[in-house]
Amino acid sequence: MFLRLLFVLLVMLNIVAAAWLLLGQPYAHVPPATDPGVPELHLLSELPAHDTAAAPADSIAAPAAAPASLPAATGASADYRCLTLGPFATPHDLQQARSALAPLTRRMRSRQEQVAQSHSWWVYLPAPASRAQALALTRQLAVRGIRDYFVVSGGDQPNTISLGLFKDQDNARKRRADVVAAGFPARITERTETAPQYWLDLVTEGGSFDWRDRIGTDGVGSHSTSCF
């Protein structure tokens, strides 16, 4: 009987000890509030007296240092002259000019422009209302001694009577004058085509610049331009 009572007493003491370990230390198993290596934050009221006095002073950031002043610019700007040379007939001519002038310039750039150039002059009679009327008009031209003509059959000017296409403007004017003298209202118009032109822009340091002796290309001129 005594042994049984002693066993029960030991069991109850173990239960009380376990309860005290679990419930009597509420913060024993609480994980830390910060990551490892990161200092914890404390209220000012939690700090010792000497730390509390130093805290506000440490929290004031030092004023940013004033930027160092830039060094003053030295030397006067160079006297530049900017020119455009051209037009050059081919890209090959342009490249030769670049190579010849490169030692004498500070900067260069090439440009290509599309321009309308005179191709030929066309002498013609305006188209009548029908092809039959155009053919009848050609018979009248033949009677008056006018040769070398044909009736345009397609394109945007059908039934127009072509009297010739001339490279030289003076020859075109003479042809028109002969047809008008025969009693027909001949007209003349310039025909153009788009062709590329090549230019060279360059920047040199002041003074004279004799580029003609360097490139030796006929038909090339120069004029001042804005610097780039």
Image: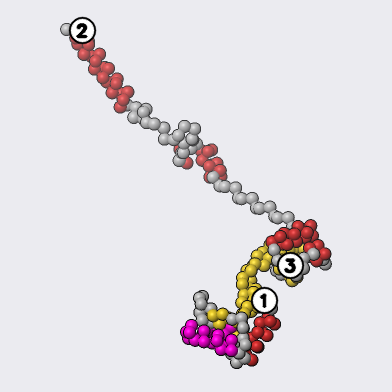
* Left or right position of 110 against 61: right
Helix or strand or loop: what does disc 2 sit on? helix
Disc nearer the start of the sequence (3/2): 2
Q: Position of residue 97 (x, y in %)?
A: 75, 61
Tag 1: residue type? Lys
Question: Measured from the top left, where is residue 33 in percent x and y?
Answer: 41, 35
Q: Which mark is residue 153?
A: none
Q: Amino acid at mark 3?
A: Leu
In which quadrant will I find the N terminus?
top left
| Residue lying farthest to the left in this orientation | 1
Alpha carbon separation for disc pair 1 and 3 = 28 Å
Residue 140 in the image: above or below residue 150 = below
Would residue 219 appear left or right of 18 to someone viewing this image?
A: right
- The disc at residue 3 is 2
Query: Mark 3 sits on what residue?
Result: 85
- The secondary structure type at the circle numbered 1 is loop
Q: Position of residue 174 (x, y in %)?
A: 68, 85
Which tag is nearer the camera, tag 2 or tag 1? 1
Find out whether the residues at labels 3 and 2 contact each other: C-beta distance under 8 Å: no
Most frequent secondary structure within the magenta stretch: helix
